[in-house]
Amino acid sequence: MVLTDLIRRRALIAAFANRDFATRYRSSVLGWGWSLLQPLATLAVFAAVFSIVFRVKAPPMGNGAEANFAVFLFTGMVTWNLFSSLLTLSMTQLKSNGELLKKVNFPAWAPILGASIVQLIQILLELAVLIVMYLWLRNVGWTWVLAIPILIGVALFAQGIGLMLAIINARYGDVMYIVSVVLGALYFLTPILYPLSLVQEQAEWLATVVQINPMSWYVESMHQVMYELVAPPAWQVAGLLVLGFVVFWIGLLVFDRSSEDIGELL
């Protein structure tokens, strides 16, 4: 079974994770500081443009305080960055390790999962900054605990899709460019830069498109448990976690069955 093999090869996955951790930002002066500088710079620009220029207003915070668009935005960004970064990284790792896969016999998913572990560390740094922001604003509640299964669901969901796209990208190099365009469009069809209620007021058909986007389910749930301090129904949180696991399991199966001749493609 693929999942059993994954557990058995955990040392190999860890070895690839250590390699990626040692080489990422190796020649950079700021090092891992870049992992925070980029999202914070994006946050500053988007928060200024959408809250001041377009005057988009976030809903009130869960502690009864006034709306804080920057925190609302960053909550969605952290969730989205987890999804997009894992998906993109997973999709490109096969080609990055092509020469090694041709010389050494090991599961092709090992370097993908290893690199994903390092990417998770970067997202955890962003999450730590988000938590500090909430603590500063005293917007704290027990519903934060529900963010754990939601984020795990996001990670599994992204990893599963990334594994499937990795095989397709190895065969057809244009896939990574197509996915980049799709992710760009999907970003604006996810309630990150705006609350869903705003779209519902302006265009009901567009709100329907946003609501059927799976990433909207995860982002909206994160807004509920961290920003609004509202506990979603138990089935909703469980459903997001199960969805992530099912997509990951399917992605791993598809990848495992399609990667036998991957060395020839690379």
Image (cartoon, grey):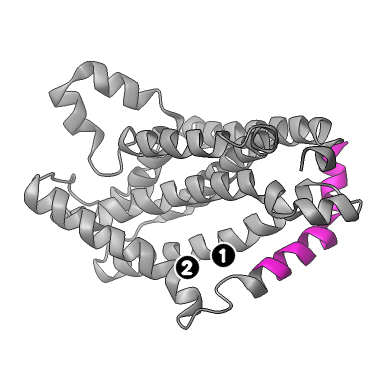
Q: Quadrant of residue 21?
A: bottom right
Residue 224: where, in percent of width, then height? Answer: 34, 43
Q: Which of the labelled discs sits on residue 121, or is there none? A: 1
Magenta region includes residue 14? yes
Q: Nearer the viewer, residue 71 or 256?
A: 256
Q: Is residue 57 left or right of residue 85?
A: left
Q: Quadrant of residue 142?
A: bottom left
Question: Measured along the vertical axis of the image, is residue 1 above or below residue 147?
Answer: above
Q: Nearer the viewer, residue 140 or 50?
A: 50
Predominant SS along the magenta part: helix
User: In the rendered structure, which amino acid carries the disc numbered 2?
Assistant: Leu
| CB under 8 Å between discs 2 and 1 | yes
User: Looking at the rendering, in which quadrant would you find the C terminus?
Assistant: top right
Q: Residue furthest top?
A: 205
User: In the rendered structure, which amino acid carries the disc numbered 1?
Assistant: Ile
Q: Residue furthest bottom?
A: 29
Residue 89: where, in percent of width, then height? Answer: 59, 50
At mark 1, the secondary structure is helix
**Residue at x 45% of width, y 30% of height:** 214
Q: Which of the labelled discs sits on residue 125, or is there none? A: 2
At mark 2, the secondary structure is helix
Residue 116: where, in percent of width, then height? Answer: 63, 55
User: Looking at the rendering, in which quadrant would you find the N terminus?
Assistant: top right
Residues rendered magenta in the picture: 1-20
Q: Quadrant of residue 193?
A: top left
